[in-house]
Amino acid sequence: MTQQEVFSPDRTHLYRFKVDRILGRGGSGTVYRGLDPETGQVYAVKLFHANFFRNRMHHREIAKTVARFAKFSHLNVVRVYEFISGEEGDCIVQEYVDGPDMKWYVANRPWNLGERLVIVAQICNGLQYIHDQGTIHHDLKPSNILFTRKGVAKIADYCLCRGGFLVFWEGGVHEQITPMFVAPELIQKEKATHKSDLYALGVTMYVLFTGRVPFEVDTLQKVYFCHLRVIPDHPSKVNPACPHALGDIIMKLMDKNPENRFESCDQLRIGLADIGRSRI
Ligand SMILES: Nc1ncnc2c1ncn2[C@@H]1O[C@H](COP(=O)(O)OP(=O)(O)OP(=O)(O)O)[C@@H](O)[C@H]1O
Ligand SMILES: [Mg+2]
């Protein structure tokens, strides 16, 4: 895998880190590659947009979640080390992952069913771990799945909003949640649970196994309408190389009713193992 586009950074330093490049920009902020000169260790430092935090409570929640997660570690979860808040802005110091993200992967890598199933199995392990810590990811999507150059998949950005309800404004979900991956129950203002993460995982898998999003519509309102009412095309119809049974699993994850989705990521992994076996 080759590295993604390299952007020249607009700064040389961020707090104690020497910055040498921008790893990417998203809705929540800019991610820099930063070197800690004292230790020689490289990190991904996400600097949040000034308007990212909804209020002081949201800011405190994220600081608390980062502090809690700094104690945990899992191979398939991007480590977070520290939340820094000060004159230069608010940052999360994270493990630097040296390969591309899943968005790049889907657009550039040739089809390989086995490789993609291995990726999903790794995501299941990481997401189960996050759920086991009592946390809901809230924003699972291809750009939050990162790869090392050796092909280890890692889940990023799980500490950006914890528990609770999504914040709605003018009929829409707060912009830090990506509409294409939002579970229908969240649109109906129900509380986020691990089942809403399973829906987002279903949409992510839909993209991974078909190469396109389940609902190809152009407005926010239509996206929400589709999540609530429209059954997407079966993945094996969109991509004939996607086994029917795998398509069924993706459809189950994307079920409008949270109760009909898998119980947990572990259950999903067991279901996927059967597909792996039946293809060998
Ligand atoms: N820990 C990391 N190591 C290496 N690259 C990273 C890391 N975190 C993010 N990136 C890169 O930066 C890009 C932008 O990430 P960012 O989280 O800011 O945006 P996003 O995921 O597209 O959207 P959102 O802001 O909604 O999370 C990612 O797609 C990835 O390529
Ligand atoms: Mg992200």
Image (cartoon, helix red, strand yellow):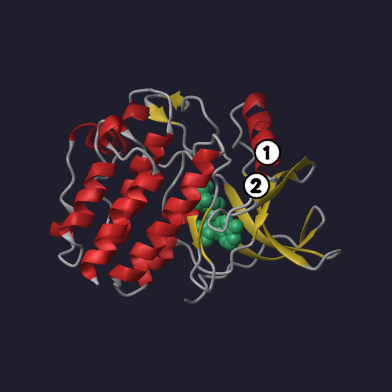
In the rendered view, tell whether residue 156 sits above or below residue 181. below
Say if residue 210 shows up in the picture.
Answer: no
Horizontal and vertical percent for residue 52? 59, 37
Helix, strand or loop at label 2? It is loop
Q: Position of residue 92 (x, y in %)?
A: 67, 47
Q: Residue at x 34, y 43 (%)?
A: 180
Residue 249 in view of the camera: yes
Work out whether 23 lies above or below 174: below
> Which of 155 and 259 lies nearest the eye of the viewer?
259
Q: Position of residue 167 (x, y in %)?
A: 48, 26
Q: Residue at x 40, y 58 (%)?
A: 121
The answer to whether the beta carbon of the residue marked 2 is less than 8 Å from any atom of ligand 1 is: no
Left or right of 246: which side holds 36?
right
- For residue 84, which numbered disc appears in the image? none
| Residue 263 occupies quadrant | top left
Give x and y (percent) for residue 29. 59, 48
What residue sits 64% from the left and 36% below the top?
A: 65
Q: Which residue is mark 1?
A: 68
Other-residue count near label 1 (Cα within 10 Å), few / some / many at <14 / 14–19 / ≥20: some
Name the image quarter holding residue 78.
Answer: bottom right
Q: Is mark 1 within 8 Å of ligand 1?
A: no
The answer to whether 215 is drawn above or below residue 102 in the figure is above
Q: Amino acid at mark 1?
A: Arg
Left or right for 69, reference 225: right
* Tag 2 and tag 1, C-beta contact below 8 Å: yes
Q: Amino acid at mark 2?
A: Phe
- Dot 1: what SS? helix
* Closest to the observer, 170 or 104: 104
Front residue (pair 26, 124): 124
- Which residue is the site of mark 2? 72
| Drawn side of residue 258 relative to residue 161, left or right | left
